[in-house]
Image (cartoon, rainbow, N blue to C red):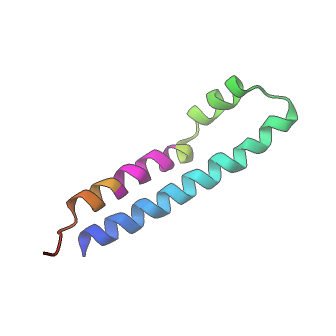
Amino acid sequence: MGYILLFLIGFGMAVSGGVTLIAYLNFLPTGISWLEYFHFVKGRLECYFLPIGFIMMAIAIYRLPQQT
């Protein structure tokens, strides 16, 4: 049960981080470069939710007991 909860929390964090990164892509048409975009994203806490969520999901999938 704990690994399922870990997976769901990781999934929610990954979705939140991915949506945030996509939303921040709207800054590109305003004239900022890709380098400025990545520098801005690097400083935003919510953008780190995507990789953290992926790691949490990977741990939950890897550690989930397998039925034989």
Q: Is residue 56 magenta?
A: yes
Q: Residue at x 56, y 44 (%)?
A: 47
Q: Quadrant of the C terminus?
A: bottom left
Q: Residue at x 62, y 36 (%)?
A: 41
| Closest to the observer, 63 or 19 | 63
Residue closest to the far left: 68
Q: Residue at x 54, y 59 (%)?
A: 15
Task: Give the quadrant of residue 67.
Answer: bottom left
Residue closest to the far front: 68
Question: 20 above or below 7?
Answer: above
Give how far across and how far down residue 66 sits, in percent: 18, 70
Highlighted magenta segment, given as a residue range: 48-57
Q: Quadrant of the N terminus?
A: bottom left
Question: 55 above or below 30?
Answer: below
| Closest to the observer, 65 or 1 | 65
Q: Is residue 11 left or right of residue 36?
A: left
Q: Is residue 65 magenta?
A: no
| Closest to the observer, 68 or 10 | 68
Q: Main secondary structure of the magenta part?
A: helix
Question: 53 above or below 27?
Answer: below
Residue closest to the far right: 30
Task: Give the quadrant of residue 63.
Answer: bottom left
Give how far across and how far down residue 20 sits, in percent: 63, 51
Q: Is residue 13 left or right of residue 27?
A: left
Q: Residue at x 63, y 46 (%)?
A: 21
Total count of labels: 0
Give how far across and how far down residue 43 sits, in percent: 57, 33
| Closest to the observer, 61 or 56 | 61
